[in-house]
Image (spheres, grey):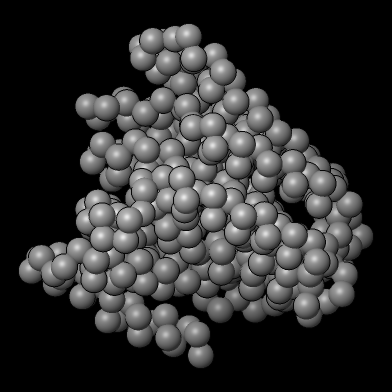
Amino acid sequence: MMNKIFLILIAIGFPLSVIGSLLHFPSVLMFGVYCLTIIAIASIMGRATESLTIVAGPRIGGLLNATFGNAVELIISIFALKAGLIGVVLASLTGSVIGNLLLVGGLSFFIGGIKFKRQRFNVFDARHNVGLLTFSIIVAFVIPEIFTQSMNDTKTISLSVGISVIMIILYLAALFFKLVTHRGVYQTKESEENIKEEVPEWSKGKAIIILALATLAVAYTSERLVHTFQAVGEKFGWSELFIGVIIVAIVGNAAEHASAILMAYKDKMDVAVEIAIGSTLQIAMFVAPILVIVSLLFPVSMPLVFSLPEIIAMVTSVFLTIVIVNDGESNWFEGATLLAAYFIMGIGFYLL
């Protein structure tokens, strides 16, 4: 039923996006059309990556899901950088981190926990990931915040670029560790039991083609979406910070939001946790550094320096996630706790 609704949304929304941008329909109206279209396309991307997950296994499947989900975020952010909206980009990165950990993680634990009283996931993978989270958020994001207080703009950008290069190298090393040198070393009995024979909805080739076409469609729609931010902000009284942290982050990460919740509902918690935490790692250790480097090509470069509320929100999200996933089990109340933290932060960013 939902798949049909999303297909109808794409069939109506994408042509309307093209016509509306050419005929200059009102920005507020087009903002809604673009958001719904991106979410609908993201659902198709989610289905395609789920098919690939069945073929490739939970780790690679979770990685693919995070990658194609974050492709949307990356595309929106590059167009926003081009438009000089540095604040929106940094805010959307913050929103992705807290959104993946608290909103996606919380909804996954909550929805899965309503159906199953107790859900297990690979505790070794979870601990490995939260270790990297500690590095990427608490070390690599907090250091520039403190060190750049006594630096000029040139030194700030130099520090940001240096940290970005190190983070990309470590992220690639982490993938090599998980997928090559230590693949299967930390497989648990619960993980093995959760691997069931399933038939993918689409073949490998068809899923890849659909992903490629969906990514192109999202790229076009995202580019148009960015141009509506200023008008929408003025109309509803939303700050750049709120648009980035809440709106762009939710729209940009719609694919993995849907996929993680669906996986949790099917009791595939290894994949759900890999999407929620793995996506956050990819945002912090790959997408953010890439954006810093890409911004060097534009008139205004983006430093890897967040505001104090953004840093505190991300660090708090990481600590809460570490405490909750450290036992390798989840339930609906832990999900509700994560969601409560997200809504508290959302209210704070709205009122800033």
Question: Could you tell me residue 101's position as x and y percent?
Answer: 65, 52
Is 118 left, or right, of 351 in this rendering? right
Q: Is residue 264 visible?
A: yes
Q: Residue furthest left?
A: 23
Q: Residue furthest bottom?
A: 1
Q: Position of residue 172 (x, y in %)?
A: 59, 34
Residue 245 visible to an observer of this rendering: no
26 or 47, which is in the foreground? 26
Q: Relative to 197, does residue 158 appear above or below in the rendering?
A: above
Figure label count:
0
Residue in the image at 21% along x and 75% along y: 15
Residue 33 horizontal side relative to residue 318, left or right? left
Provide residue 234's location: percent of width, then percent of height: 26, 55
The relative height of residue 301 versus residue 192 in the rendered view (above or below) is above
Examine the rendered structure and indicate whether residue 32 appears above or below residue 212: below
- The image position of residue 337, as x and y in percent, is 75, 60
Which residue is rendered at x = 52% and y = 76% of the image?
202
- Residue 140, image quadrant: top right
Q: Quadrant of residue 19?
A: bottom left
Foreground: 287 or 99? 99
In this rendering, the answer to whether 293 lies above or below 236 is above
Give the residue drawn at x 45%, y 72%. 44
> Measuring 36% from the left and 14% from the top, which residue is drawn there?
153
**Going by the picture, which residue comes out furthest to the right?**
189
